Image (cartoon, grey):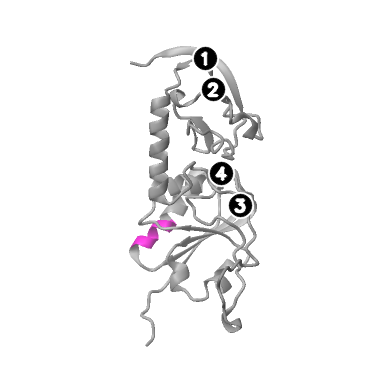
Amino acid sequence: MTHKTIRNIVFIDEDKCDGCGLCIPACAEGALQIINGKAKLISASYCDGLGACLGKCPKGAIAIEEMEAERFDEVATTAHIKQMEQEAEAKEMPACGFPLNKEISLKQPLMTGVTMKESIYKKTMLNQWPIQLALVSPNAPFFDKADLLLVADCVPFAYTNFHRDFLNDYTLLVACPKLDDFQSHLEKLTNIMQHSYIKSITILRMEIPCCAGLIHMARQAISASGKDIPLQEVIIGTREKAK
């Protein structure tokens, strides 16, 4: 039986919320999540109503209001946090579930305890971080006016000159259509297109059948976004390495 009472609890104005995600790590109880590009209170029983998330919202979309809601359930909240930590550990993601959306320049590689011969040293051409589709925020600044390169995660290992031939001036996203959560990736890609002006999308994949999922994902995301975004596909062969 659900017990409700009049108490202070988080209220989110979805018209103001832009889904930046800054409120997520501020909520130690894990009561907030980004769903369909908006911050959501997933359960009133997880919210203690103390408002630690208030000062983190740049849009002023979060308030604490007195209303009828489920009581704060400390036992259920503790179990919820433990489950989040276990899921994050399994996925090798931050426990808070916060997408890393800070743009980081990688033009000068950081190498610790590594000695490389001058003949093989090359500077990276990667323009931003993070690169995993599962980790980026749809509102990350590097998506604005971007030529998007969506790459199957095997490609950089199979194609020797990946940096030289493909990365220049592209915003990179990496995903695996077979091993990753296709639906989650589709929703994230759609949100990126809806929130930013994407100039073009290039799909870079291996010639194996499962990799074709990336092109299907991109087409569905473009359709769902309601935008007309040029799309092209580049397929990398899997020829046997010369002996």
Disc 1 to disc 2, C-alpha distance: 8 Å
Q: Which mark is residue 7?
A: 1
Mark 3 crowd level (few <14, some 14–19, many ≥20, 10 Å Cα): many
Amino acid at circle 1:
Arg
First-in-chain label (1 vs 2): 1
Q: Which mark is residue 49?
A: 2
Disc 1 to disc 4, C-alpha distance: 36 Å
Give whichever of 161, 193 is nearer the camera.
Answer: 161
Disc 4 to disc 3, C-alpha distance: 11 Å
Q: Magenta segment, which residues?
A: 210-215
Mark 1 touching mark 2, by CB under 8 A?
yes
Taking the magenta stretch, the answer to whether it contains residue 150 is no
Amino acid at circle 4:
Gln
* Residue name at image x 59 percent, y 29 percent: 52
Amino acid at circle 2:
Gly
First-in-chain label (3 vs 1): 1
Disc 2 to disc 3, C-alpha distance: 34 Å
Could you tell me what secondary structure mostly forms the magenta stretch?
helix
The picture places residue 140, in percent across and down from the top left corner, at 60, 48
Mark 3 or 1, closer to the camera: 1
State whether residue 69 is above or below residue 135: above
Q: Which mark is residue 194?
A: 4
